[in-house]
Amino acid sequence: MTQVAKESAGVVVERLRAWNPNAVSQVIEYRGQTTIVVPRQFLRAVALECKTNPSLQFNMLSDATCVDRFPVEPRFELNYQLVSIARVQRISLRTSVSGQEPVVDSLMPVWKGANWLEREIFDLFGVRFDGHTDLRRILLPDEFEGAPLRRDFPVEGKR
Amino acid sequence: MTTVETAIGTAKTMVLNMGPQHPSTHGVLRVLLELDGENIVSAVPDIGYLHTGIEKSCEDKTYSQAITLTDRMDYLNPLGNNLVYCLAVEKLLGLEVPKRAQYIRVMMVELQRISSHLVWLGTHALDMGAMSVMLYCFREREEILKIFERFAGQRMMTSYIRIGGVAVDPPAGWREMVKRFVDMMPARIDEYEQLLTGNQIWMGRLKGVGYLSPEELIDLSTTGPGLRAAGIPYDNRKLFPYSSYEEFDFDVPMRTESDCFARYLVRVAEIRESVKIVRQAMDKITDDGPIKADAPGIIPPQREKMKTEMEALIYHFKIFTEGFSPPAGEAFVTVESPRGELGCFIASDGSPKPLRVHFRGPSFVNLQALPFMVDGELIADSVACIGTIDIVLGEVDR
């Protein structure tokens, strides 16, 4: 197996900034994990650049999930975990979505694997994904009302 | 969930409902198959029948209470689930786990990998009509469950791996017990291979079935044996080592055919590699040494200390009444479960209960590839494809 020397995550941030200075609004370092905060309107473009740029090659979307920071606004934080198999690197992308208009661009056109991950977020948080071709509930029944993983949804369920 | 009416279907094709109560769907998976004769035109998996809201429940528990919930996700890999959750909490806390505990963890999760692959092999062979293999596989799995029972007091829902280390010291006589198992196992794997690898029916059912190109598999986020059977050396133990895996000498089995037969060969080879790792871990585990990190206020104190030291008693009380509070932040860690990349994302807001716990289940993500795998294949092949994706519905639905 060819082990590529790991480059620091700072290189990724530099390359993204060189591509578009507005694409990175903040970089969070926490316990050796780099999270790049991206403005909502740039999310799909940044994801596509991460995937197709030959010096980045983040060819796999490992995970997508949402954090509800209710009552803080914008309440939803979407976290995307990207992997570059060739360059042996991980990076997180993050974007914030408001509670009034919980819509964000789908990453399905970039990675087909985003399909179920985004359906899960839609199902449990009620965040909609623009450009998703099959946005249906995935775990809960169609007639279920509400989004159970929101912080204002009681743990014991609504009675 | 999808109703039959909303599924696709024209006058030329018929829609067949497979599952959720069907033995070859390995639990409660439902697949809507659109058929043209015996050929599959499209397949729509329908999941959620086992959804128990584990992620939501975790938000209402302290960090240490949630460990028991993780056991119940992927019920063929409870130790692996414990491990990924504990690694995520340890990352939030910045906690260093003693080497001895790390080696015990490695040994246990590798035994778990063997047992999980044995269940897969047995049930998959049963799906394909080879009944005897299942009896042999469950015979060996029983030995592993006996080891778990001695270590943790539980056969399946072990909760053995805890935040900062493992629950208890290995029991007296564990070395002989594990050694007996790893000495026996290689010959038993040969036995399974004799029954299956050269078997004409087995090859006929699996070879060339469920092909997907490596590029498609990566695009669909598929990980684990399914991706390695397509020639991509993606294994978290090698690429992103955790729990001292970098100190172990093992190979990552790979094939390039990317069909169901290649996935079978990769899994069987992985059992052999896991036996190697267990052997090395046994040598590394010393007879004495710490099994838990030294972190008062996070790790419960020893019983004896509680009877003599005031601080220990206070810490014990505080840990079990209010828990501990990691600093605010997010941690995402991944481990290599028997099914692929198992990830755990925890967001902390600085309170004793997590703000968000999310599990990236390899079964859930890998199942996405099913419609692409069975496209144009025969109905009987869908069973082979579901089998070789190796799903555990507890993890798919969580």
Image: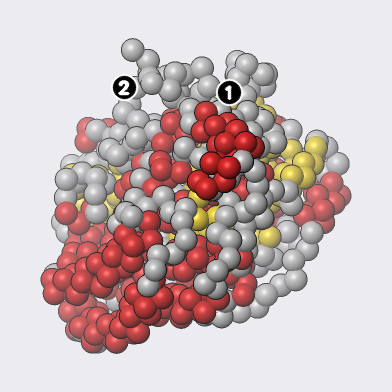
The correct choice, above or below, for B197 with respect to B352 in the image is: below
Question: Left or right of B386: which side holds A133?
Answer: right
Residue matched to label 1: A102
Residue at image point 68% right, 60% down: A89
Q: Earlier in the sequence, mark 1 or mark 2?
A: 1
**Is B297 or A130 nearer to us in this picture?**
B297
Q: Residue B165 location, x and y as percent? A: 55, 55
Looking at the rendering, which quadrant does residue B28 occupy? top left
Q: CA distance from mark 1 to mark 2?
A: 20 Å
- The chain letter under disc 2 is A
The correct choice, above or below, for B60 with respect to B190 in the image is: above
Looking at the rendering, which quadrant does residue A80 occupy? top right
Q: Which mark is residue A143?
A: 2
Residue at image point 33% right, 77% down: B181
Question: Left or right of A151: which side holds B151?
Answer: left
SS label for mark 1: loop
SS label for mark 2: loop
Name the quadrant of the N terminus of chain B. Answer: top left
Question: Left or right of B204: which side holds A149?
Answer: right
- The chain letter under disc 1 is A
The correct choice, above or below, for A125 with respect to B235 in the image is: above
Three-letter amino acid code at the position of disc 1: Pro
Q: Residues within 10 Å of mark 1 (few under 14, many from 20)?
A: some
Q: Residue B190 location, x and y as percent? A: 29, 86
